[in-house]
Amino acid sequence: MKPSPPRRALVTGGSGEIGAAICRRLAADGLHVLVHANRGIDRAQLLAAELRAGGARADAVAFDVTDADASAAALSAIVDAGPIQVLVNNAGVHDDAVFPGMRRAQWQRVVDVNLNGFYNVTQPLMLPMIRCRWGRVINITSVAAIAGNRGQVNYAAAKGALHAATRALSLEVASRGVTVNAVAPGIIGSAMGATRFDAQTVAAMVPMRRAGRADEVAALVGFLASDDAGYISGQVISINGGMI
């Protein structure tokens, strides 16, 4: 009997630190990983090559999640090769400013990437996923969507909307074997995070007195993408060292 091909996973923003950790975890779990990037396609290609060198199946894909037409065209070509059964919506940006001084462009860009990007990527992939009668949608959000954060009204609004979308979509597809969950990280050690929080600040904010690691986020995503998580859906799962 011919073995079934591996499930295919698309990780948006896969060239970033958390995205790359998720790609590595899913590849280690036997999925065929599509590493997405927009401007970071060189990093995505290097990561895909690294995964292939380790014996995994991986490819790099590039499109702008804020461009609905470009996303639809890219996703159509991807689905032609087979359905995406695991989708990790990890692409995101923040552009911080106190709200009275926030420019319209700052609001629009953050909402476009974090929220409209979710629609532009997820909606075209849903019917092919539903037809498989098995699927996983995992949205990477933020503790800011739960607790709020000064200077991040735009970011908290977009990620909070993703929490609501997660719950609503989970109800629509629950009977089709598709789960939809959100993972809300707190302070995660990364090149980006290191410029915002020093060790003293982290110790004051986080009961565990350390920043989280990208591979810890990836481990949670890997579990939610597995068969073992088939009865978990519509949940926002925090990973923040006890912050809230």
Image: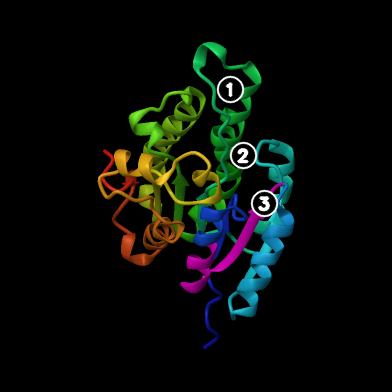
- Name above or below for residue 240 compared with residue 164: below
Q: Is 149 or 9 nearer to us in this picture?
A: 149
Q: Amino acid at mark 2?
A: Asn
| Left or right relative to 3: residue 207 | left
Q: Residue 205's x, y, as percent?
A: 31, 38
Q: Is residue 135 visible?
A: yes
In percent of width and height, residue 220 lies at 37, 58
Which residue is the site of mark 1? Answer: 107
Quadrant location of the C terminus? top left
Q: Amino acid at mark 3?
A: Ala
Mark nearer the N terminus (1 vs 3): 3
The image quarter containing residue 135 is bottom left
Q: Secondary structure at mark 3?
A: strand
Q: Which residue is mark 2?
A: 120
| Disc 3/disc 2 C-alpha distance (Å) | 15 Å
Task: Report, in whole angstroms, how far the alpha carbon at label 1 lies from the one at label 3.
Answer: 22 Å
On the image, numbered disc 3 is attached to which residue?
A: 37
